[in-house]
Amino acid sequence: MPSRGPNTPPPEQKTYLKYRYRTWSTYYGWTSTVELVEAIGRKFDRSQKSADRWAQFILAEAINISRRQSPPRGAYPFGAWQSACTVLPEFFSEAAKQERTTRLTTMDTPFLYKFLLGTMDSDFQAEDLSPTSDELDTSFAPDGTTPSSTVDEAETRLLATLPVPGSLDASMADYEGFAYTSGIELTEGKQARYRQISALVCSMVTFARNHRHNGMQLTNAIQFEFWQSNHSA
C-alpha cells in the first residue's frame, strides 16, 4: 500500500471535500461560494496591478454573461422582429411599448440593464446627498416654504423649458420607453430617467448585434415620418 504524504488529506476528508465541491453552485452552497469569491477579490485589491487583473477577469465574465442574453428571434409578438409592411397600429400603443420594454429589461437583457442602471443610479451605491451649488436655494422662507413670487418664477422657468405641443421637440421627446422628465420630483425623476436610459441602451445594443431586433427603431422611424408628413410645407 503506497504511503500517504504529509499534506495528503485522509480518504474520509477527500470524500467530504468532493461532497462540498458538488454543492458550490447549488442553493445550499452558492452563498458561501460567493463569499469566498468576494474574499478572493479583496485580496486582489492590495495592489494596483492585481486589482487591474481582477477587473480584467470580472470584465470578461460580464461580457460573456451579456452576450448570452438577447431577445428571442422570430416575428413579433413571439420574437423581436416587426416588419414595416405588416405592422399594426396596436404595435405603437403605450401598452405595447411598455410590454416590450418590460420584456427587454427583465427577460431579454436583464444583466445589461441592471449593470447600466446600477452604474448610474446612486441607490445601488452609497448616495452622495451633498447639494450642488445649483441645488442650493436661499429663497426659502424660515419655515421651509417657498414665497409665492418664487413659486411663480420657478413655474415660469419650468414652462419655458418644456417642449411646445406639436413641435419637433414634443414629438421626439417620447421614444420607445424613453421620455424626458421635468424634474419636479428630483429623486423620482432621476431614477425614472436612469431606467429609461438603461432600457434605451439595451435596445440599441440588441439592434446593433442583430438588426432584426428592430422594435424601438421602427417605432421611432414611423413616428418621425408621421411628424414630418404633418408639418411639411
Image (cartoon, rainbow, N blue to C red):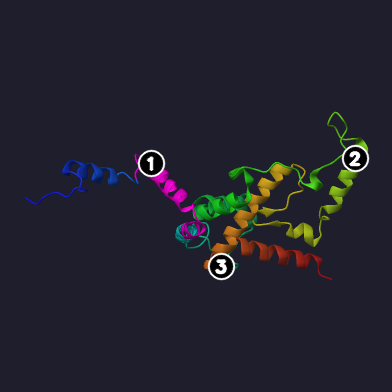
Of circles 2 and 1, the one toward us is 1
- Among the two numbered marks 1 and 3 on one chain, the one whose residue lies closer to the N terminus: 1
Mark 1 and mark 2 in contact (Cβ < 8 Å)?
no
The three-letter amino acid code for the residue at tag 1 is Ser
- Among the two numbered marks 2 and 1 on one chain, the one whose residue lies closer to the N terminus: 1
Find residue 43 and report its horizontal and vertical position in percent: 45, 50
Q: Is residue 82 visible?
A: no
- Among the two numbered marks 2 and 3 on one chain, the one whose residue lies closer to the N terminus: 2
Q: Is residue 108 left or right of residue 25?
A: right
Find residue 215 and report its horizontal and vertical position in percent: 59, 61
What separation in Å lies between label 2 and label 3 (alpha carbons)? 47 Å
Total labels drawn: 3
Q: Residue at x 77, y 48 (%)?
A: 182
Residue 213 magenta-highlighted: no
Badge 2: residue crowd in 10 Å (few <14, some 14–19, many ≥20): few
Of residue 172 and residue 2, the one placed in the foreground of this image is 2
State the residue position of label 3.
208
State the residue position of label 1.
32
Badge 3: residue crowd in 10 Å (few <14, some 14–19, many ≥20): few
Q: Residue at x 83, y 31 (%)?
A: 144
Of residue 229 and residue 35, the one placed in the foreground of this image is 35
